[in-house]
Amino acid sequence: RHKFWETQPVGQFRDVADGSLPDGAIEPPTPLSEVRADPYPLPAAFEWFTCDLDDDALLADLYALLAHNYVEDDENMFRFNYSPAFLRWALRPPSFFRAWHIGVRAKESKKLVAFISGIPARIRARDDVVRMAEINFLCVHKKLRSKRLAPVLIREVTRRVHQENIWQAAYTAGVVLPTPITTCRYWHRSLNPKKLIDVGFSRLGPRMTMSRTVRLYKLPDAPLTPGFRQMELRDVAAVTRLLRSYLARYVVAPDFDELDVEHWLLPQEDVVDSYLVESPETHEVTDFCSFYTLPSSVLNNATYSTLKAAYSYYNVAVKTPLQQLMNDALIVAKQKNYDVFNALDVMENEGFLKELKFGPGDGQLHYYLYNYRIRNGIKPSELGLVLL
Ligand code: MYA
Ligand code: JJ1
């Protein structure tokens, strides 16, 4: 069934019932001297190409590959359109490895035709903090599909991760592979319902008119919580403390330090937005919320070419009720002209989705670990990890 995945150290569907297998690494590390030294062979017309994302021209090539060939919804109406600035942010966190930004080019034209990336992360599974790679942006040009290039890309990134003495990875996909640790649902909160209906992202509900729908999703003009403001550099230590103590309650979550928080959560226009509540009395930072910006191209629409979407990222509500905090996040996203606010049913999100008028989407996101077993998997609400 899975000619490639059956050969890999991942939970196999046939083992799911076997409760005797322990949590943790599926296979032990091999000595670094035994890690294959040279790249896996590619079909003769292609060559490996390590991408230097400092180079604006290269970044533009990667942007274009993904804008035309990356993930679409099940009816091919929308395609993720990660911006160049977003890709730079996503691929260059603290201590990133340039060798993990792996392109494949046509030898003759030098055109970029495929890509896969890894970034280093510390991820905790129960009480075990593990150095992992987060694998993302696997993409093969539409004209080169179904030629078994993806397994070559995956083996090559695995080899380069092993060369750094890292033996585990985390990744997400919209497709089912052996074997998800959990399966999440996307939820969507309309901010600009008329446009969403016009492009076919959502539909007019039964017995609803356009004007009733617009009224249903109306939001206040400005956030309601006193002390709600944008996060700044001076907040990094306070936000790190909040986030670390919050993520400690999840079964699988990143182990963020201050450098990670500065990179992943300090606001960058049209890439990542973070807000916090600073108590007007004590000036203590009590709550925090964030979202990242990932537009989608609208395929085949005469009026609109993109949807501006915000994706819920990490949120920590200590003093302010989570629902109120997220309502303020919706308000600032609306102010900033986003069309839709998306969220997964991870962490405590179930607690605000319905109340804040999110509706379930038709997409699922499966989470995976490579060479790490978690017996019986976990529930979305036990997951404290959001990948981009
Ligand atoms: S998920 C986003 C993936 N990208 C897209 O969906 C963009 C649009 N699609 C494409 O570009 C292509 O369809 C892709 C497949 C490239 C996805 N993850 O070459 P093929 C298996 C893993 O003939 P193509 C993301 O970026 C498939 O089951 N495997 O197929 C995270 C089959 O294997 P098997 C996948 O359609 C990526 C084989 O590939 C995926 O031309 C995490 C067929 O290959 C998928 N999304 O190309 C990667 N889709 O026969 C794993 C298909 O066994 C990382 N396949 O069923 C693992 C950890 C590595 C590091 C480890 C370090 C220690
Ligand atoms: O965006 C998604 N679905 C939308 C559009 C559906 C268009 C037809 N297929 C959706 N809209 C309904 C919204 C509605 C708003 C009012 C309230 C009720 C709901 O459902 C879906 C997610 O739901 N997105 C995708 O399918 C994109 C791919 C998702 C898999 C991602 C894999 C990522 C790889 C990671 O590395």
Image (cartoon, helix red, strand yellow):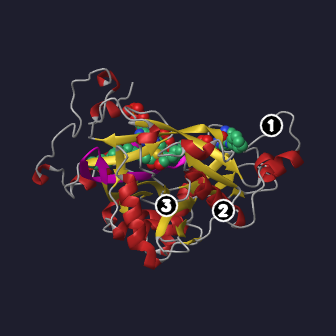
Choose mark 2 or mark 3, whichever is in front.
2
| Foreground of the two, 226 or 174 | 226
Q: Residue at horizontal 29%, vertical 31%?
A: 375
Q: Residue at x 30, y 68 (%)?
A: 95
- What amino acid type should be assigned to the residue bearing mark 1? Gly
Q: Disc 3 marks which amino acid? A: Lys
Q: Which mark is residue 205?
A: 1
The image shows residue 107, relative to residue 299, as above or below, that is below
Q: Of the residues under marks 3 and 1, which one precedes in the sequence?
A: 3
Task: Indicate the position of residue 31 as horizontal and vertical percent values.
Answer: 10, 50
Q: Is residue 375 left or right of residue 340?
A: left
Circle 2 is placed at which residue position?
333
Given the image, on which type of amino acid does mark 2 rest? Answer: Ala
Labels 3 and 1 touching (C-beta < 8 A): no
Q: Nearer the viewer, residue 262 or 63?
A: 262
Residue 147 seen from this side: no
* Residue range corresponding to the magenta coloring: 123-150
